[in-house]
Image (cartoon, grey):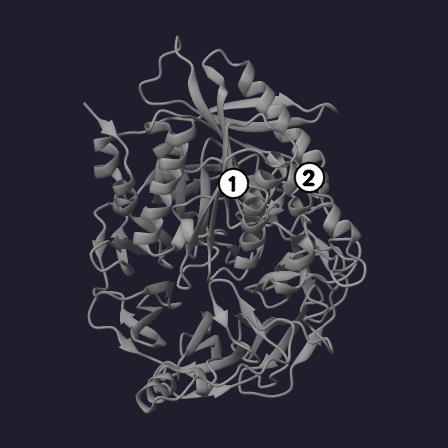
Amino acid sequence: MKRKITIDDLFRIRLLGSPQIAPDGSQVVFVYKWIDTEKNKYFSNLWRVRVGEDQPQPFTYGEWSDSQPRWSPDGKQIAFISNRQKPKSQIYLIPADGGEARPLTSLEEGSIGEFAWSPDGTQIAFTYRETAPEWRERARKERQEKGLSNPPLVIERAYWRLDGDGVFLNQRYHLYVVDVATGEMRQLTTDSAYSESSPTWSPDGKSIAFLSNRQPDPDNEPGKVDIWIVPAEGGEPRRVDAPYGPKYVLRWSPDGKHLAYIGNPDPEESYPRNDHVWLVSVEGGDAVDLIPNLDNTVGVSTLTDVREFGGGAPLLWSADSEMIYFLVSERGGVYPYRVRRDGTHLEKLMDGDFEVADLSIAGDAHRMAMLVGSPTQPHEVHYAERTGNTLHTRPLTALNQPLLDEVEIVAPEEFEVEADDGVKIHGWLMKPPDFDPSKRYPTILMIHGGPHAMYGRVFFHEFQLHAAEGYVVAYTNPRGSMGYGEEFARAIRGDWGNSDFKDLMSVADYLQSLPFVDPERMGVAGGSYGGYMTNWIVGHTDRFKAAITDRSVVNLVSMGGTSDFPQIPNRYWKGNFWDEPQKLWECSPLASAGRIHTPLLIVHSEGDLRCPISEADQLFSALKRLGREVLYVRYPQESSHGLSRSGLPDLRRDRLERYLDWWKRYL
């Protein structure tokens, strides 16, 4: 007899990531992440599994954070990033047949971004952002020992911090190359005004292409990202003629003729747009959208609490330079696709009730490693082999199976409702494990953040927990969500609280019509934009018995200048936050605070840089002055916007306990 899932089970879930198949397809190395509740920390090592043996084993050891494994071109070594020299991170090398990992780099305290092996395996290109000397741990300790204060932050740029990353002021990522044999490094880009990303080598090893926004003021023109090529030995970068617009992943074709990238050609209104796979000649010219008729975005848009948002963003060439492989988010799932270089033969390789969160391919492009998760199964590493147009897949790991053998997992049921204007809204329903159709259950409507993300076909511990506690859980993708076409996603651009609110009320109507839903015991909750919509809903209807707003948006006017991404005038939102705030205020839940009568739990983190803590302060202060029923849970500075996904384990536990207590009190 299986038992119901609990809060403690969150800490038993093994968080797998970055599956990298060896060039010869014989084995897969991946990241194995776990939570140590006694130490209140996350640790990650590399594990590997040999195809055919299917017995995954640890490959690196220790209470570190090992990440980003990458095979050398000859398959004899694996490079990865590790923080085992805390507070410094370095690129390490380990032989593919096992042994001691050795540090390749000798970097000061800072952050390593992406890295790539040279085609001959003798060098590695990487991006790195150093920490300013006065903010390194050594300098902090020296000040503390001397009883000195920390120095003031001297801020010159609009983009000087990032949620989950912290304050970096004027420091930016620059491009470096390190010699694999000697560890000698050279810095290829130096201009502190710009940041570089996504390095990719030319097949002859003589040049490196990368992405960079080199506008006079890149913080005010964030969509104008260019492709640049620099000699691997150093020199002046040259710009590749390609359309402006956001670009995220860049890959050089094996034949050396083309560069492929993920992005879109709209620098002014780039969000939300469908990011597609684009191709441009190395010499520049007209870039070609290889998938113009695919009305969904490339990448992983699904939200879950068992991995960070975004997953992997693979863009992979076949060895003959004919095919490109990538992932697409659609209707709650994420699936592998491939397209021929000339834009023909677009093919969806898999379909079903799951998501593929990351992907790598062997040298022959017939064998692949994938990270696959479903609503009833946390992510595991899968192996796929392609025969013609058929992809045969099977799991290589079952590291979460011991937990699944113990607990009862609920399979969500899909539903679709029609909004008042005929648009179809897609969602899922979880019933309690011991569901009795003759009973009426308290029901909770969960609203996702983003807003341009999606709920979907992936495991969600928080939802399973609520169902196990006796609630019907509904989660849905109203307008604004990705995965249902660009028009659907852009429907709320600069106009929150309109069609999205109506969509969610149509879902609430549907829920109330179900014979097993108690209409007098309905709750609503959400985080980030989902918190915004929760605030908006309780300010416009009293139909819910209780609500929880988490890391929410409350006042778009104040948030315009306090978020880690300050609003740019007349882009996503009409006007600005200083002398044209009318639209921002019109769409702010704080403007409707006087109409809130629903008991509200406010959850927020002091370390949240995306939706600053002042958002929660304003809503709480207003409701207290109005004499409304409100409770404010304010988590400490060491927590951030991602508390529910990657926060400290004890704080994640506390948050879930407070959710359940609130629902128990009111529902």
Q: Residue at x 27, y 71 (%)?
A: 94
- The residue carrying mark 1 is 526
Which is nearer the eye, 99 or 88?
Answer: 88
At 69% from the left and 76% from the top, the residue drawn is 214
In the depicted structure, whether residue 321 falls above or below residue 524: below
Tell me what residue is drawn at x 69 percent, y 61 percent: 567
Which quadrant holds residue 184?
bottom left
- Residue 53, above or below 163: above
**Percent x, y for residue 639?**
41, 59
Position of the C terminus by quadrant: top left
Quarter occupied by residue 504: top right
Q: Which residue is drawn at 22% across and 32% down?
A: 405
Disc 2 or 1, which lies upstream in sequence? Answer: 2
Q: In this view, does 585 lie above or below 170?
A: above
- Residue at the bottom extreme of this rendering: 146
Say which residue label 2 marks: 497
Which quadrant of the rendered structure holds the N terminus? top left
Q: Badge 1, how many Cα within 10 Å: few under 14, some, many 20+?
A: many
Residue 138 percent location from the top left of the image: 34, 86
Q: Tell me which amino acid carries mark 1.
A: Gly
Q: Is mark 1 on a helix, strand or loop?
A: strand
The answer, for residue 26, to whether it is visible in the render is no
In the structure shown, which secondary structural element does the residue marked by tag 2 occupy? Answer: loop
Mark 2 belongs to which amino acid? Gly
The percent position of residue 323, horizontal first and vertical second, equals: 57, 51
Using the numbered discs, state the Cα–Cα distance from disc 2 to disc 1 in whole angstroms: 14 Å
